[in-house]
Image (cartoon, rainbow, N blue to C red):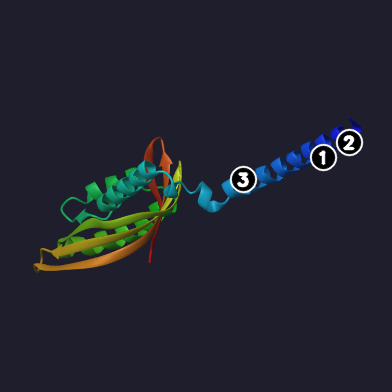
Amino acid sequence: MGLLTLVLALVGALTLALAAVFAFQAHQLRSTDSASNLALVDPSLTDEAISSVSAGLNRVFTYDYADPSATQKAASELLVGDASSQYKTLFDKLQSAASGQQLTLKTTTVLGGVTTLTPDSARLLVFLDQSSTRASDSNSSTAAAQLDVAAVKRDGVWKISEIRPL
């Protein structure tokens, strides 16, 4: 009986040791960056972030010299943090040049993708097309832009917190 007890105790100890090793390895796998990136596992939240941020960029970067308040309103609703100050600098320059040229800009998001995503923050790569028209001389042009965009979700609304041209 003593030998059987010893064998059972060793098997039990080995089982407990293996369980601890496996639990530790499982914890390491779950705590990696890729495991916590919801962009890889939550398609509805990923789509929501892309859709909201794309629509926000379209509103913020569309401008009509005859009604600059629409762009300013979009910026105040959708931009926070660094994006607000970055945009204010850009908007002030645009507005001073646009009124004399009677400039309008129409921005369209062509493609967007989420690189990292948590329930309340996202980083996206966004490709935009921007068409500009100067009514003063009927000159039109189109330009493409690539942006690295950070966004945060506040009160259920995605807000753009950083915009970096690439």
Q: Which residue is mark 2?
A: 3
Q: On the picture, is 134 further left or further right than 110? A: left
The single residue placed furthest to the front in the displayed view is 1
Give the residue type that dot 2 points to: Leu
Quadrant in the rendering for residue 139 = bottom left
Q: On the picture, is 19 further left or further right than 124? A: right
Specify which label sits upstream in the sequence, 2 or 1. 2
Image coordinates for residue 79, horizontal then vertical, percent: 37, 48
Front position among marks 2 and 3: 2
- Residue at 30 percent of width and 51 percent of height: 54
Front position among marks 2 and 1: 2
Of the pair 36 and 79, the residue shown nearer to us: 36
Q: Which mark is residue 26?
A: 3
Of the pair 67 and 128, the residue shown nearer to us: 128
Assign a secondary structure to mark 1: helix
- Give the Cα distance between marks 2 and 1: 11 Å
Give the residue type that dot 1 points to: Leu
Image coordinates for residue 155, horizontal then vertical, percent: 41, 35
Q: Which residue is mark 1?
A: 10
Q: On the picture, is 155 further left or further right than 142? A: right
Quadrant where the N terminus lies?
Answer: top right
Front position among marks 3 and 1: 1
Assign a secondary structure to mark 3: helix
Give the residue type that dot 3 points to: Ala
Quadrant in the rendering for residue 77 = top left
Image coordinates for residue 13, horizontal then vertical, percent: 79, 39
Residue 138 visible in the snapshot:
yes
